[in-house]
Image (cartoon, rainbow, N blue to C red):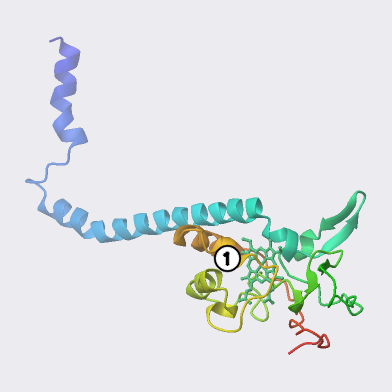
Amino acid sequence: MNERHEHLIALAPERTVPNMKSSPQLLKTSLAALPAAGLALALVLGGCVHETRVARGQYLATAIACADCHTPKIKGPKGPEPDQTRWMAGHAEDVQLPPPPKLAASPWNVVEADVTAWAGLWGVSYSANLTPDINPGLGIWTEDMFIQAMRTGKHMGSGRDILPPMPWNYFANLTDDDLKAIFAYLRSLPPVSNRVPDPVPPGGAPGFE
Ligand code: HEC
């Protein structure tokens, strides 16, 4: 062993490893710091988990194309485009639609040009505001309500039947983790105050609650 190595070894215990026996105060301080360090680590990891969850939710919601039905459109050079300023805000409250054509004896359903309102044998349905706006967005929804709505097809997880063409029965197959991720993504969106009309029963007149 050459002189240089001996020097490093001689230094090592003092410089790099705190001598616990000779420093009970240091040991105490280190142990006392453990919960704080654990909390900080948990917060950092919690933040990372949340970001990952939101990113996963964005990935799923984009691939499933929730925005196709849930975002009002603007006129683009090649036809209707999603209005980025009202992303996922549901059927636009400022759109006044004429009554749908009579469909009773027809095998057809109709969809309005924004792809946010539909008429069929169930009446007229309007896509919901999925932004975290308090009312009528998802602001007051809990994660559990969202999962229940997607699993049972009941409004807010326990109310009336959710109407076509909302394909909740397909989304019911998503795992809890995926549904939680979609919910986390929706909660991360900017809230848009847009009051979507209530659905209209067959033969009824459009209106708000
Ligand atoms: C084919 C069009 C369509 C697609 C795609 C779609 N939705 Fe909907 N959604 C609707 C319509 C229409 C309603 C309103 C139904 C009603 O009033 O009962 C609705 C309602 C909802 C509601 C409110 C349910 C309730 O309890 O009243 C939620 C939440 C929702 N959609 C989430 C989503 C999510 C998340 C996605 C994508 C993963 C999605 N939707 C994709 C058409 C769609």
Left or right? Give the position of 173 relative to 200: left
Q: Amino acid at mark 1?
A: Asn
Instruction: Give x and y (percent) for residue 159.
Output: 57, 84
Residue at image point 74% right, 81% down: 199
- At horizontal 19% and vertical 22% (from top left) the residue drawn is 8
| Callout 1 crowding tier (Cα within 10 Å): few <14, some 14–19, many ≥20 | few
User: Quarter containing ligand 1?
Assistant: bottom right
Front residue of 98 and 186: 98
Residue 134 visible at all: yes
Which residue of the protein is positioned furthest toward the left in this rendering?
21
Picture residue at 78% right of the left edge, 63% below the top: 85
Tell me: 137 left or right of 182.
right
Q: Nearer the viewer, residue 205 or 32?
A: 205
What is the quadrant of residue 70 in the picture? bottom right
Is 195 left or right of 169, judged from the image as shown?
right
Q: Which residue is mark 1?
A: 169
* Horizontal arrangement in the rendering, residue 76 relative to residue 63 (left or right): right
Residue positioned most to the top: 2
Observer-nearest of 103 and 97: 103
Q: Does residue 91 lie above or below 48 as drawn?
A: below
Residue 14, horizontal then vertical, whole percent: 15, 34
Q: Is residue 140 visible?
A: no
Which quarter of the rendering shows the C terminus? Answer: bottom right
Give coordinates of residue 95: x percent, y percent. 87, 75
Residue drawn where x is 80% and y is 64% of the image: 115
Who is closer to the viewer here, 188 or 202?
Answer: 202
Q: Quadrant of the N terminus?
A: top left
